[in-house]
Image: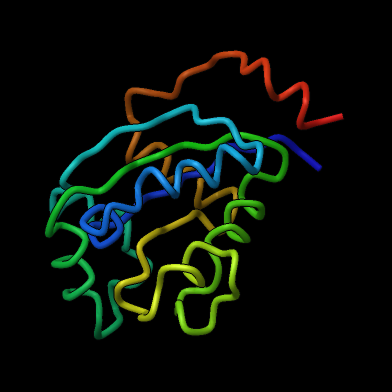
Amino acid sequence: MSKETTYVMVKPDGVQRGLVGEIIRRFEQKGLQLVGLKQTIPSEEIAKKHYDVHSDKPFFSGLIKFITSGPVICMAWSGTDAISVSRNLIGPTNGRDAGPGTIRGDFGMDIGFNMIHGSDAAETAQFELGLWFPEGLNEWTQDSLSWVYE
């Protein structure tokens, strides 16, 4: 077990559907600490950097068009094993395959409109946090966490 910080983004479809508050609530109730939060409409340049790993895939241009189509919510969450905990809260990419209780399982029906992105590894999280939060993250003590971790 290790304390990590991970990047999570509510995509334009999640924002348009009014799911931002519900998504934040789930991360907070799980016991993760919000250390960065902002709303932005991604530039094409930032979107291409974020999704560079998919640049050779046929869906890349559609992905860039989608992610730049409206506001996204950029978040940084910190806690013990925050990356795997976040991935479990989010669920598999296709909402039809995601189990009940996950964000995608409860609200998603499609691979393309899957509402949320979460870093998949420590290196990815570091890159994405630097890309979306160049100004840095907040450091603060959340007193209620003493009731989450032993």
Quarter of the figure with the N terminus: top right
Q: Is residue 65 above or below residue 36?
A: below
Which residue is at 29% across, 79% downward?
56
Seen from the viewer's position, the closer of residues 118 and 121 is 118
- Which of the 4 quarters of the picture holds residue 39? top left
Q: Is residue 35 above or below residue 84?
A: above
Which residue is at 44% across, 49% downward?
23
Q: Position of residue 147 (x, y in %)?
A: 78, 25
Q: Is residue 90 above or below residue 145?
A: below
Which residue is at 38% across, 43% downward?
21
- Which of the 4 quarters of the picture holds residue 36? top left
Q: Position of residue 55 (x, y in %)?
A: 28, 72
Q: Position of residue 134 (x, y in %)?
A: 33, 29
Seen from the viewer's position, the closer of residues 116 and 138 is 116
Quarter of the figure with the C terminus: top right
Q: Is residue 65 left or right of residue 37?
A: left
* Numbered marks: total: 0
Q: Position of residue 114 (x, y in %)?
A: 37, 69
Colour convention: rainbow
Seen from the viewer's position, the closer of residues 80 and 98 is 98
Q: Is residue 1 left or right of residue 21?
A: right
Which residue is at 62% across, 14% downward?
141
Q: Is residue 6 above or below residue 15?
A: above
